[in-house]
């Protein structure tokens, strides 16, 4: 009996093509997220919508905080996340929400605004007052300045642009609406105020968000045409101004803010 081991003959050269095909390598799923670091309070912005006979005058105070947002990106096979980019972002915390009683005269509204501003705590920057000047125009702005306030008057326009010249600005309603929408979508807007008008503001924000999501530009164009969303407008004015503070803490060197 032959006791030699059984051997399988191996060819001198292997075939170039394997007998079974390999598929493409699995696609690496990319995951992105961000972290906000070094939150820093900057200033309070007071947004005011001056109502007419059928609309409320409203006051919203926005506490603006700056943070460094670090974006990360990671694939399924990377052990540690890789930093993608950094940017400065503004966080908005709505601290005060108020609807002034219907029929209140403009001088009394101005006195109330001055009273609210006098209670604002000290911050690195003085408070900024932003007022909707679309309907009332320059007379009410002049009356505010005569009473010691120096508001930025914002005239809401059609189109999609904005211009700022000292204490007068022209801003498209699409810009105001998109500023609020972006702050909501990026989790940079919080309503932390208390009081009877807070739930009204939250309801207006929910309705506003649904309209923007459903109609996009059509919603922007019809905003403020039929709805009584005066609190959202006051908040939008404050948020829009707070976003403009991101340029190295300076909106416009010619602005003369409320003296403290």
Image (cartoon, rainbow, N blue to C red):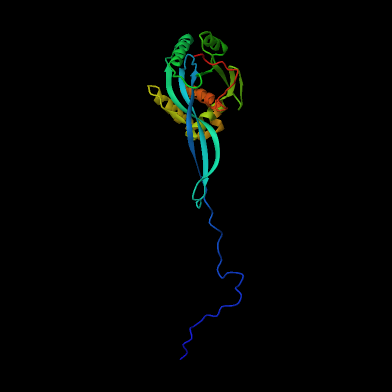
Q: Looking at the picture, how far across and down is residue 248, in whole percent?
A: 57, 27
- Number of numbered discs visible in the structure rendering: 0
> Considering only vertical position in the picture, is 186 above or below 21?
above
Residue 255 lies left or right of residue 195; in this view the side is right
Look at the image and tell me whether residue 134 can be seen: no
Q: In the picture, which quadrant includes the N terminus?
A: bottom left
- Residue 95, quarter of the rendered image: top left
Residue at left 46%, top 24%? 63
Q: Looking at the picture, how far across and down is residue 173, in whole percent?
A: 56, 25
* Furthest residue toward bottom: 1
Residue at left 48%, top 28%? 40
Residue at left 46%, top 87%? 3
- Residue 23, quarter of the rendered image: bottom right
Q: Looking at the picture, how far across and down is residue 125, in whole percent?
A: 51, 21
Q: Looking at the picture, how far across and down is residue 242, in whole percent?
A: 52, 25
Give 165 or 52, whichever is nearer the viewer.
Answer: 165
Look at the image and tell me whether residue 249 can be seen: yes
Give 21 or 229, whichever is nearer the viewer.
Answer: 21
Give 110 or 228, whichever is nearer the viewer.
Answer: 110
Residue 12 lies left or right of residue 100; in this view the side is right
> Considering only vertical position in the picture, is 28 above or below 153?
below
């Amino acid at each position: 009996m032959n006791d030699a081991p059984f051997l399988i003959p191996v060819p001198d050269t292997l075939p170039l093509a394997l007998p079974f095909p390999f598929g493409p390598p699995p696609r690496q799923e990319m995951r992105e997220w961000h972290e906000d670091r070094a939150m820093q309070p900057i200033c309070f912005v007071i947004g005011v919508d001056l109502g007419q006979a059928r609309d409320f005058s409203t006051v919203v105070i926005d506490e603006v905080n700056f943070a460094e947002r670090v974006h990360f990106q990671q694939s399924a096979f990377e052990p540690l996340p890789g930093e993608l980019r950094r940017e400065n972002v503004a966080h908005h915390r709505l601290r005060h929400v108020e609807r002034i009683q219907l029929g209140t005269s403009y001088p009394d509204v101005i006195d109330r605004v001055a009273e609210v501003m006098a209670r604002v705590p000290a911050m690195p920057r003085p408070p900024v007052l932003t007022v909707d000047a679309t309907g009332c125009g320059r007379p009410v702005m002049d009356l505010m300045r005569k009473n010691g306030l120096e508001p930025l008057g914002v005239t809401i326009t059609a189109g999609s642009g904005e211009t700022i010249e000292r204490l007068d600005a022209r801003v498209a309603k699409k810009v105001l609406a998109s500023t609020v929408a972006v702050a909501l979508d990026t989790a940079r807007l919080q309503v932390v105020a208390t009081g009877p008008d807070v739930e009204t503001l939250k309801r207006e924000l929910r309705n506003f968000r649904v309209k923007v999501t459903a109609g996009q530009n059509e919603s922007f164009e019809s905003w403020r045409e039929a709805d009584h969303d005066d609190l959202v407008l006051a908040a939008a004015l404050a948020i829009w101004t707070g976003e403009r503070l991101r340029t190295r803490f300076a909106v416009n060197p010619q602005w003369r803010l409320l003296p403290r």
